[in-house]
Structure formats: structure tokens, C-alpha cells
Amino acid sequence: MRLLLFHHIVLSGYIFSEATKKFPDNFKFGVATSSYQIEGAWDKDGKSPSIWDHLTHTRPWHIEDGRNGDIACDSYYKYKEDVRMLKELGVDFYRFSIAWTRILPSGFINTINWDGVKYYNNLIDELLKNNIEPMVTLYHWDLPQTLQELGGWTNPIMEEYFAEYARLCFKLFGDKVKLWTTINEPRLVCLMGYGINVMAPAYNNTGIGDYLCGHTLLKAHARAYHIYDDEFRKDQKGKIFIVLEFQWLIPKTNSTADINVTETARHFMFGWFANPIYLGNYPKVMIDLVAERSAKQGFPKSRLPKFTEKEIDYIKGTTDFLGLNTYTSFLTNSEEFYDYKMVGFENDIGFQISHDPAWEATAQPQFKIVPWGTRQMLKWIKETYDSPEIFFTENGMADNGTSLDDQLRIKFYREQLKAVLDSMHKDDVKVSGYTAWSLMDNFEWVSGYNLKFGLYHVDFTSPNRTRTPKSSVAYMRKLFKTHCPIEECE
Ligand code: BGC
């Protein structure tokens, strides 16, 4: 089950049969990074520690290579170089995140760190000067450690603190930033951070802590959305949305048990956050199953917290697009040896996941390449959530960085984009943008620097953190210019 935690990829051999080979003219292309993964300067100019600084410093053994983001790509100092790379790629936008502790070192809005604000203003100005639109994520996993000490996302008060931080960001940067994303991948924040001791803050509280975290994150997201909507949208005229990740789930066999559990798992893995936002409240199957399991386990009430009617209404409809991150697909089958006494998110679903050995592998065994899975997933999302407008906020693959000639990455992007085009043209899925992860190699969370997702190679042994384009840069540059993922367009 550990597999769930990582991203996974698969693909190859996706048959592209669509006559329309190009993305529409108004389709937007960009690339993404996040603060902790690239900035470095972890304690410079007034920044305070986030939960990732804390985890990597106090428990370095938790990270595969024992390393951390103290320097990372050094983008705090090298942001102009980053923008030059973005310019070379010809992106329409750049998705990056703000480190909460760089602008609010105490975590609260009592003290603003103007040096931190200056850094983001400089970056945003440099982007705009180069005609690159900033897409800013408010929360990409680096919670202030001060707030973690109050329980982090399991404490409902975090909704307030996040709301104040978000309002400040809209005030500070909203005249120039028109694309905001609130929370990056809440499911992973909760499952991996509070459920199964993988990501910071690395707690082991599955089936309880993860649900509490999700509840707060949903309310915090909705709060930020409403603040933008009520106080800023009229003047700033931007868009604001959540970023959810989904690795498509495919029944392992045609048995009714596998088909049913797969559908249930989709609602837990994606519906947990998509349902409250698109349809109102948690998915019924999730409410029912967690309540049933909780009762059998002797809990006085469901481990899944309950929204009031007012909260259901408040959260519903709070996203302008569906920001979607995806990396792979999994096979799903029902758990043979289900033990009702075991308290845990995965046990609440009662499923197991695996891969088809025929799927094409990447550097990471769990990361297979499955472009047709992406297409099936988009269709399911369309049918389940009444055709939302989808904006891909991340998609990419890792290798081990041994060659700058990253042909597998080019193939990955080509096949994925063909599948997205088919979804748009044949399945009528609304997709308006696509973001590649990542601009450059960076700190890949618990994998440290072992996994490389970048279009640009970064030399982490050099004090200059020298950036070098991989072969995929030329492919992406052409794609961004022509809007065509295949050779034969010209
Ligand atoms: C995260 C990124 C991460 C990427 C690759 C996404 O879940 O948002 O921060 O680097 O996956 O694992």
C-alpha cells in the first residue's frame, strides 16, 4: 500500500487517432516548481523554519539521501536565471509557490517580513517583464513550524491563520497576480503528513489525523476563495482554484468486487476533496463506510468529521477551475484479508493497488507510464462532476538524471498530451491549460535529490547550482510555440 504514496507513471504505445492535432490557440502552457523544493535560503533575510526545515534538520534519516532544501536550487538568489530559462522555454505562465514563513515568520500576520515580500515582488516583476504570467500557489506543503506546534492542519484554528495569510497575499501581490491556487494536493498533505508518517510533519495517525486535516484544509481553502471573491475579485479580476491530485484507478479484474472497490476508492482518493467543492459534502460512500467501520471499531461516532449544512454550502462551488495534478495510474482490487479492527484510511476503503507489469517503467518502479489512464480519468471526472473546466497544474516523470538526453521524458509528455487532446476532442472534456512538472531538478521531498523531474538539469554539487537544458527543453519549446505535441504537425 505504500505505493499509494508516491507518484507513478506509465505509458507508451498510446494510439493517437485524432485529426485535430493541436491545442487551441487560447490553451495555456507552463511549468511548475514549489518554494521548498527550489528556493534554498531557508533561514535568510528573516525567514523562519517550516515543517520541512524542521523534519529534514531533526530527522535527516527520513529523507532517502539524508539531504534537505537548505540551498536546493538556490532560486532565492538565482530567480533571474530561472526566468531566463522560462523565457527560453516560451511558457505562457509559471506556477510557483510562496513560502508562508518567508513573509510571515511567526506564522501569524502580526509581523510581516518585508525582505521576503521583496523577493516575491522581484520574481513576479521579472516574470511580467518577460511576458510570463505568474500562477501562485499559497500552500505547497511548507507550513510554519510554529503552527505545526499547535497541531498543524488537525487543528481547526488553522482555517483562520490560513485565511489571514491568504488575504495578505492577495493584498500584497494581487495587483500583479491573476492566477491563484490555494492548497496543493490536500489528499497528500493529509494522508502522507498526518496518516502514514511520510511527508512533514510525518505523523502516524491514519484514519483519524488525515480526516481531521482534510476537514480543516477544505474549510481553509473555501475561506481563501470567499475572501478573494468578496474582497478582491472585483478589482483584481483574477481566478482562484484548488489543486487536487488523482492517480487513475483501474479495476484489476472484471470481478464485481474489484469494479466496486475501484469506484469506492476513486471517491475516497479524489472525491474526498472534489465532492465537497463540486457537489457539496463528502462522497456518500465515504460517509457511510467510515461511519460503519468506526462503529464496529467502538468509536462513539464516525472518524470522518461532519460538515454542518452551512459549511456544506460555504464550501460548494469554491473553485474557478479544477487544478489537476497527475502522474500515473494503478490497478485496484478488493482487499482479501480485510480486518475490520484496523483503523486506517486504506482499510476504510478495503482495497489494494498494483501495476500491470506490461506498463512502461521509469526510474521509479511505482512510476509507470499510462497515458490512456489519463484519458479515462478525465472522462470520469467529466461525468462525475458535471464537466468542470480542468487546468493541468502538474504532470511529469522522474528519471535518475544520468543523461541530459532525456528521451523517455519527451515520450512521456508526447503521449500524455496526445491523450489530453483526444479527451478534449473525442470525449468533450474541457481542458484549458497544461503545466509540466518541473522547470528544473529539485528537492523531491522524501526522495531527496535522487529523483529528477526537471526539464533543466541542476548540478547540485556546484555552488552555482548550474542549470543545463536537457533534450526535453527543445521538445517543450516547440510544443509551447506550435501547440502541437507531435512531429507531423508542420
Ligand atoms: C507535488 C510536487 C512533487 C511532484 C513529484 C506532486 O505531488 O506537488 O511537489 O515534486 O508531485 O513527485
Image (cartoon, rainbow, N blue to C red):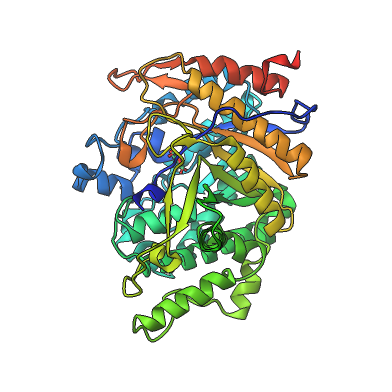
419 shown above or below 222: above
Can residue 174 be seen? no
Which quadrant of the render holds ligand 1?
Answer: top left
349 shown above or below 479: below
Percent of width and height locating residue 223: 57, 64
Percent of width and height locating residue 165: 49, 56
Residue 279: which quarter of the image?
A: bottom right
Residue sitting nearer the eye, 279 or 26: 279
The residue sitting at 37% across, 54% down in the picture is: 192
Percent of width and height locating residue 407: 50, 17
Can residue 130 be seen? yes
Percent of width and height locating residue 150: 32, 66
Q: Is residue 338 left or right of residue 166?
A: left
Which quarter shows the C terminus? Answer: top right
Q: Is residue 136 left or right of residue 301?
A: right
402 shown above or below 291: above
Number of numbered discs on residues: 0
The residue sitting at 77% across, 39% down in the picture is: 426
Residue sitting nearer the eye, 127 or 378: 378
Outermost residue to the bottom:
300
Residue sitting nearer the eye, 474 or 428: 428
Residue 403: which quarter of the image?
A: top left
Q: Is residue 42 left or right of residue 283?
A: left
Residue 474: which quarter of the image?
A: top right
